[in-house]
Image (spheres, rainbow, N blue to C red):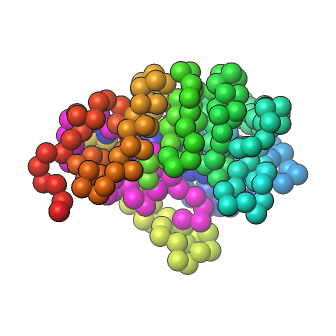
């Protein structure tokens, strides 16, 4: 089986709520779940339940999980080559941001927040240590930035964009003994309905993708929390390291392993012995 989790970044008090409602409608129509990485404070505005009734309702219905998307999604080093809201800040400053943001989201949604998605997909070991100490289940960033060194905090990085999900699944199926996991990410700006006419997605294409996903007998859809619970943190850490190792290899090596998936088991299980591209 192939485990798939969908992550939608950047819902907030001031995001495009009409687009979010349309995405939630498509999810409900096709029985798809997802994790919405939600910003607790947009500028000076702390999120309230009145700001996002559509997210509150969807969370209560079980269609989505809410994860914490930093504090305000503002870089602490503007103008730097690699923006980050957390990396480089001292422990006290990071703790204050994480604690305050989590408290806001828990008040809005009435549930414990178990997942953390750092803005810009960047963090450091101080971030990971605080999240572990505070009992977060997982951190989901980008596979290219940072690594979690913790036996309690699960790392579930993005493995592809949502627009790459079909080829990611096709690639995973070339490794039938796999037990693979895919984390696909989308943003508002991926949709033409956001106002970006060059965006790769439309709501109609999203609905078609969701319909197709639900028809795949070898795909299990999860929220990130449920995906994290499939294995312990150590197993996921090794899966992330395998994925990063594959990404660094010559293309001939990359071609025999899945590139868009996390591999929870030993690499030998995922070797593609036949049909390798040349």
Q: Is residue 255 visible?
A: yes
For this orientation, the residue located farthest to the right is: 44
Seen in the image, is 80 located left or right of residue 236? right
For this orientation, the residue located farthest to the left is: 274
Q: Total of numbered circles in the picture?
A: 0
- Image quadrant occupied by the C terminus: bottom left
Residue occupying image coordinates x 64% and y 24%: 132
Q: Please report the bounds of the magenta region as a residue range.
A: 161-190
**Does the magenta run of residues contain 276?**
no
Q: Is residue 54 visible?
A: no
Residue occupying image coordinates x 59% and y 75%: 196
Residue 39: image x %, image y %?
A: 72, 47
Seen in the image, is 215 located left or right of residue 161? left
Residue occupying image coordinates x 44% and y 37%: 240
Q: Is residue 87 above or below residue 198?
A: above
Residue 21: image x %, image y %?
A: 61, 55
Q: Is residue 199 above or below residue 47?
A: below
Seen in the image, is 17 located left or right of residue 153? right
Residue occupying image coordinates x 55% and y 37%: 147
- Is 162 or 144 nearer to us in this picture? 144
- Is 42 or 147 nearer to us in this picture? 147
- Is 240 or 30 nearer to us in this picture? 240
For this orientation, the residue located farthest to the bottom is: 197
Q: Is residue 48 above or below residue 106?
A: below
**Does the magenta run of residues contain 174?**
yes
Q: Splitting the image into 4 quarters, where does residue 18 fall?
A: bottom right
Q: Splitting the image into 4 quarters, where does residue 164 fall?
A: bottom left
Residue 1: image x %, image y %?
A: 28, 36
Residue 91: image x %, image y %?
A: 78, 32
- Is 72 or 33 nearer to us in this picture? 72
Seen in the image, is 216 located left or right of residue 91? left
């Amino acid at each position: 089986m192939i485990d798939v989790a969908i992550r939608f970044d950047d819902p907030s008090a001031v995001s495009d709520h009409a687009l979010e409602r349309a995405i939630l409608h498509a999810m409900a129509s096709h029985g798809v779940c997802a994790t919405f990485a939600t910003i607790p404070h947009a500028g000076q505005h702390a999120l309230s339940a009145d700001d996002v009734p559509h997210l509150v309702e969807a969370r209560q219905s079980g269609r989505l999980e809410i994860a914490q998307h930093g504090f305000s999604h503002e870089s602490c080093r503007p103008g730097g080559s690699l923006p980050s809201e957390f990396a480089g800040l001292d422990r006290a400053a990071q703790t204050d941001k994480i604690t305050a943001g989590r408290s806001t989201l828990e008040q809005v949604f009435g549930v414990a927040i178990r997942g953390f998605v750092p803005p810009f997909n960047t963090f450091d070991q101080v971030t990971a240590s605080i999240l572990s100490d505070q009992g977060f289940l997982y951190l989901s960033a980008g596979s290219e930035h940072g690594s979690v060194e913790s036996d309690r905090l699960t790392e579930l990085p993005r493995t592809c964009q949502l627009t790459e999900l079909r080829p990611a699944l096709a690639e995973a199926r070339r490794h039938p003994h796999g037990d693979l996991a895919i984390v696909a990410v989308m943003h508002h700006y991926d949709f033409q309905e956001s106002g970006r006419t060059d965006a790769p997605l439309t709501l109609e294409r999203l609905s078609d993708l969701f319909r197709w996903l639900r028809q795949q007998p070898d795909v299990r859809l999860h929220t990130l929390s449920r995906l994290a619970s499939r294995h312990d943190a150590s197993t996921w850490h090794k899966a992330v390291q395998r994925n990063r190792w594959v990404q660094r290899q010559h293309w001939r090596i990359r071609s025999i392993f899945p590139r868009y998936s996390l591999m929870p088991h030993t690499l030998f299980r995922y070797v593609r012995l036949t049909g390798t591209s040349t």
